[in-house]
Image: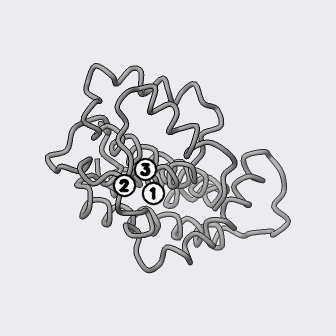
Amino acid sequence: MSLEAEFAVVDLIKDSGAVTLGVDALTLSIVKLERQLRRLFTHLVFQCEALDDGNIPELVKALEERPDVNVTGFITGIDALFRFSVSDMVGPRYSKSRTELREIYKVRNKLFHGQLTGESLDQCQLLERVATVREWCELLSAGALARVGYDGFGRDSFRKSDRALAADYREQLDSVDAYRAFIGAHVVGRTNW
């Protein structure tokens, strides 16, 4: 799957004419961003030489059993594991994008909990935020594809790369237990854009 295919449903919502299209497109875009980072993280973890197809159910379970895993934790996890950081993959817009995403997540948190944002955002302002989320995903996609060979949108993140990515890892995960410990050390906690 490509970024365009992943965001096709967001585009349908934007073109729907629905009264709530701004909120709907924004919330779904955020889900796409979070899934992209999770998939990129799990893809990179799976490159560790000790892990193979037989470990996939346990690797999935290791994430499922941690309710405190969060989107920015995937960023810190990637940064702790891989020699190229998410900042390297996103490029020069990284810092500005993180600042914009911090503000978007404040809106997201209010929307997800049925609260008022206090900003009285109109549809156009919400769609501008959708564009910001999509831009982040596009930048990360291009950078990850260039450095990793996987953009975070392919359905099967648990597949071995034809690149020797793990040779340059900062940390080798030699078991599922090591993966669980890595999640606890780097991926859990509060979302912190």
In the rendered view of the protein, which quadrant contains the C terminus? bottom right
Tag 3: residue type?
A: Gln
* Tag 2: amino acid: Phe
Marks 1 and 3, Cα distance to the nearest angstrom? 15 Å
Q: Position of residue 21 (x, y in %)?
A: 61, 57
- Residues under numbered marks 1 and 2 in contact, where contact means CB atoms less than 8 Å apart: yes
Give the spatial CA distance, label 1 vs label 2: 6 Å
**Tag of residue 79:** 1
The secondary element bearing badge 1 is classed as helix
Q: Is residue 31 left or right of residue 67?
A: left
Disc 3 versus disc 2: nearer the observer: 2
Residue to which mark 3 is pinned: 36
Q: Residues within 10 Å of mark 2 (few under 14, many from 20)?
A: many
Type of amino acid at the residue the image marks with label 1:
Asp
Residue drawn at x 34%, y 56% as measured from the top left: 3
In the picture of the structure, the residue carrying the numbered disc 2 is 82
- Residue shown at the point (27%, 54%) measured from the top left: 168
- Which callout, 3 or 2, points at the residue further toward the start of the chain? 3
Residue 27 x, y percent position in the rendering = 61, 52
